[in-house]
Image (cartoon, helix red, strand yellow):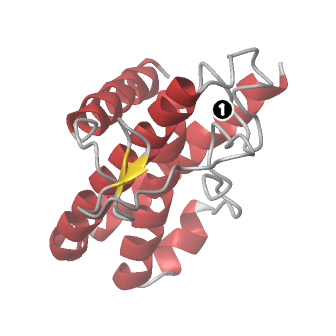
Amino acid sequence: MKNVTLMFFFLLMFCSVNAQQFGTAQILPNGIDLKSGKDNDDSEASTEVKVNLPKSIISTSAEIRTYHTDKVLGEMSKGALVDLYIEHLKVVIKKMPRIALATKPGVTIIDLGIPDSVDNRRILEIEDEATEAYLENSISFLKNMLPFADKEKLVTMVLFYEQMMKSLLEVGQQ
């Protein structure tokens, strides 16, 4: 259990550091400048960003819906294990840096008593964009490298991610 705790801590630190690395980008893919809240085109007809509903702290896609046994994973093809590993990693990266705030999707900054200000919404949007950029790069890397991984190690890590998420569910219910 001590090794699982240490791996969990390492993974949490890794996710936070790498997500922050991308947090310096101020322009979203849709052209919105997060600092000013305006469309980043050179025309004078810039539009204000209008966001009325607060976003969830934890993405609704940050859930493992099916848990597997060692036997079932051992019977899967390596390609299926790679895909499952990547899907589980997405969940971990989207959820772990925010678990001190919320452990389940649907909780908003308002639910936590955090002021629903433009600045707080920008901060959350910047973090979401940084996470997506990090995931995009990581997935590209993993799709090229994981096919060379040992199948048993893939099985072990998928089980590790699933156990970590089960533990998080237990903590969230306390």
Q: Quadrant of the C terminus?
A: top right
| The one of 126 and 152 positioned closer to us in this rendering | 126
| The one of 1 and 137 positioned closer to us in this rendering | 137
| The one of 14 and 137 positioned closer to us in this rendering | 137
**Residue at x 28%, y 63% (from the top left corner):** 41
Instruction: Pinpoint residue 92: horizontal percent, then vertical percent.
Output: 48, 45
Instruction: Pinpoint residue 13: horizontal percent, then vertical percent.
Output: 32, 25
Q: Quadrant of residue 17?
A: top left
**Residue at x 52%, y 70% (from the top left corner):** 73
Above or below, 137 relative to 151 = above
Q: Amino acid at mark 1?
A: Leu
Instruction: Pinpoint residue 38: horizontal percent, then vertical percent.
Output: 41, 49
| The one of 135 and 142 positioned closer to us in this rendering | 135
Local secondary structure at mark 1: helix
Above or below, 135 relative to 54 = below
Above or below, 160 relative to 170 = below
- Which residue is identified by label 1? 168
Above or below, 56 relative to 40 = above
Q: Quadrant of residue 147?
A: bottom left
**Residue at x 48%, y 81% (from the top left corner):** 76
Q: Judge left or right: residue 44 versus residue 80.
A: left
Which residue is the extreme one toward the front? 44
In this figure, what is the number of numbered marks?
A: 1
**Residue at x 22%, y 60% (from the top left corner):** 137
Instruction: Pinpoint residue 23: horizontal percent, then vertical percent.
Output: 28, 36
**Circle 1 Cα neighbour tier, 10 Å, few/some/many (<14 / 14–19 / ≥20):** some
